[in-house]
Amino acid sequence: MRILRACREMGVPSVAVYSECDRTAPHVRQADAAVAIGPSAPADSYLNIGRIVDAARGTGATAIHPGYGFLAENAAFARACREAGLVFIGPEADVIDTMGGKTAARRAAVDAGVPVVPGTEALVDTLSDDELCARADEVGYPLFVKAVAGGGGRGMRRVAETDAVVAGVEAARSEASTAFGESTVYFERLLEGTRHVEVQVLGDEHGTVVPFVERECSIQRRHQKVIEESPSVAVTLEVRAALAAAAVALSSAVNYTNAGTLEFLLDADGHFYFLEMNTRLQVEHAVTEMVTGVDLVQWQIRIAHGERLTVDRRQALTPVGHALECRVYAEDPDAGFMPAPGRITALRSPSGPGVRNDSGVEAGFEVPVFYDSMISKVVAWAPDRAGAIARMRRALTEYEVVGITTAIPALLWVLGHEAFVSGRFDTTFLDQALAERHGRSFSDLSAEETDLAVMAAALFAYFSAADTLGRGVDGTGPTPWRHAARLNGLRR
């Protein structure tokens, strides 16, 4: 929907592709044309390169925007588009190979003089269990098993000791294969007490790279971002300049074009370490747009067609006000944030001053079990951070989703938490806060327990959708999350 809106404002006709379960999705009707590309399973539709390219050819399209997920960082897809005579709205395939693969990106960062987190190269499938454990021991514990491809916390497992290495690798490989069609993983040392900050860049085909003010993405649950904001309260002007310089150095070294994001870990002393680069537009791009006034999607399209970047670097690095984004998931916070698919029977979206809602659903839409459970992103802007938090809380209390359960009450709880309001948090804050609230953290489960719990909860939620009708208006009702949201509102 975000991309379609940019196309419409630019006078560019658009074609949507959709799977069987998305046939009634809003983007299908909003596009100028729409093409069915297969069954609901991602491998048969949104990960099927041939069907997507055929859809473009059959409708006379001249360019493809890969979106945020699925094939967005797939070099084979970028090559297939260009071999078919289509403009791929993103970087060159060789650059995706280098920067979209996390281990290759680490090597490029080292060559560009950018500090990286200690870790390994990609782990080949032929390594024995003993060899995997030996490599993990060399990195040290705790560590992450991370998928080389993709993002969004998929294909990622925390490992605390040698005995858990093999199970962590198997779980990460399985999840990565399902999400991205690529199962390769690597080990990376887990640095304690750090924040997750990232730098958006735009690069054109004429050698210009523009960095943007940082985004703070430390509010994460199971390594998946929940709330993002810009600017970060932990980044000084000096650190911002250094982050921008590192982002430009690495992007320029690999001749990066179009939109991309470089992710870093930031410690309490202001030292940062390169994690990875997302060679695509990110879900949280909206907060950057809100504080800079730059339309990143339109610039993606313009760059892909050879235009020169005219964005002023000072404007890009000088935020005006403060913006927050809350990801609204179809999940039940009272059931360990398990997916809660089903039919949305009624919907009231937030609006008003400084509020933006990038949504992919509407009343009557069936949230499917096949894909990520995020249904929208609410963005709030205000002249300062306190105002942005207050505005976001107001917006979320206006958001009503009937028929399914969402995590909106939990978002309100986080927004009212003292650690968040004060800005004193790191990437472990939310999981720890939830563990204290519920007794046992989801991250304490083994890989097998995690997979089984997710599958069981998804099936239970789907087949008991009728039961959710009575408690589907978020922000109201008797559950502990909703009581907490109300109490936090009263305290403020």
Image (tube, rainbow, N blue to C red):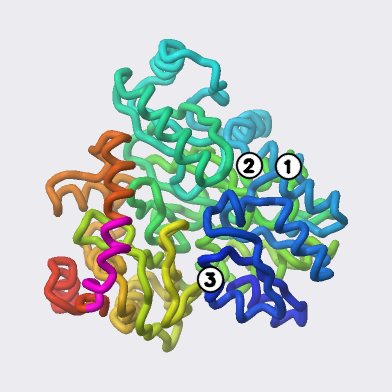
Q: Which is more N-terminal, label 2 or label 3?
A: 2
Residue position marked by numbered label 1 in the rendering? 95
- Quick check: can you spot residue 283? yes
Q: Residues within 10 Å of mark 1 (few under 14, many from 20)?
A: some
Q: Give the main secondary structure of the magenta stretch.
A: helix
Question: Is there CB contact under 8 Å for labels 2 and 1?
Answer: yes
Residue position marked by numbered label 2 in the rendering? 100
Decide which of 434, 67 is in the foreground and name it. 67
Residue type, numbered disc 1: Val
Residue position marked by numbered label 3 in the rendering? 291
- The x, y position of residue 352, in whole percent, is 42, 88
CA–CA distance in space, label 2 to label 1: 8 Å
- Quick check: can you spot residue 492? no
Residue 205 is a magenta residue: no
- The x, y position of residue 400, in whole percent, is 32, 81
Q: Secondary structure at mark 3?
A: helix
- The x, y position of residue 284, in whole percent, is 50, 62
Kindly identify the residue that appears in the image at 72 percent across and 67 percent down. 299
Q: Residues within 10 Å of mark 2 (few under 14, many from 20)?
A: many
The number of callouts visible is: 3
Image-quadrant location for residue 310 = bottom right
Question: Is there CB contact under 8 Å for labels 3 and 2?
Answer: no
* Screen quadrant of the N terminus: bottom right
